[in-house]
Amino acid sequence: MMYTPGYAGDDFMNVDPYFISDKKKKEGICLSVKGLTNGAVAVLYPEVIKKLVELMDGDFYVVFSSVHEALIHSSKLCSLEELENLLRTSNSRMTFQKEFLTDKVYYYCREKDKFIMLQGSLKMLVTTIRMDEEN
């Protein structure tokens, strides 16, 4: 589910990429699940990743504001420093510590099909979790 002021979120997978303005791609779209509980994991589903690449027109940043949601930002329009500041502010205002997920910003690289954990100039490769494959 995607939530923005102009869109209530029920049909995320059918959102037209032209619906998302450059301004919104920079400010971020809020991604969660129906019910808005423990929805940050939604960003890891392969079909959701594909849709986010389409909506963001390429690679994107992920800011996990809590266990309930992830904020998605275009990598073409945002800087890591801006997003780290956003995450620090969000985490400092968090009411319940149990809702804290991470103090790191993540970057999805379409070419490598990987999430990369970022912190300042430090980058750590994080393999994409495949929810559709059995071990």
Image (cartoon, rainbow, N blue to C red):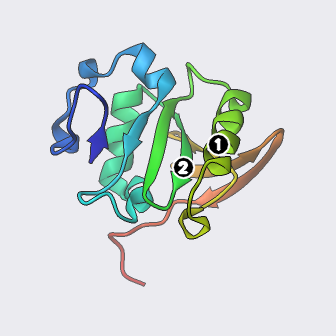
Pointers 1 and 2 in contact (C-beta within 8 Å): yes
Q: Is residue 91 above or below residue 128?
A: above
Say which of 106 and 70 sits in front. Answer: 70
Residue 6 image point, x, y percent: 24, 25
Q: Is residue 57 above or below residue 33?
A: above
Could you tell me if residue 101 is visible in this image? yes
Residue placed furthest toward the right: 121
Residue 37 is marked as none
Give left or right: position of 51 versus 94. left
Residue 5 image point, x, y percent: 29, 28
Lower sequence index among marks 1 and 2: 2
Provide the secondary structure element on which disc 2 rests. strand
Q: Is residue 39 above or below residue 59?
A: below
Query: Residue at horizontal 26%, vertical 18%?
Result: 18
- Amino acid identity at mark 1: Leu
Q: Which residue is mark 2?
A: 65
Query: Residue at horizontal 65%, vertical 34%?
Result: 83
Q: Which residue is mark 1?
A: 87
Residue 80 image point, x, y percent: 70, 32
Could you tell me if residue 112 is visible in this image? no
Say which of 112 and 18 sits in front. Answer: 18
Residue placed furthest toward the front: 95
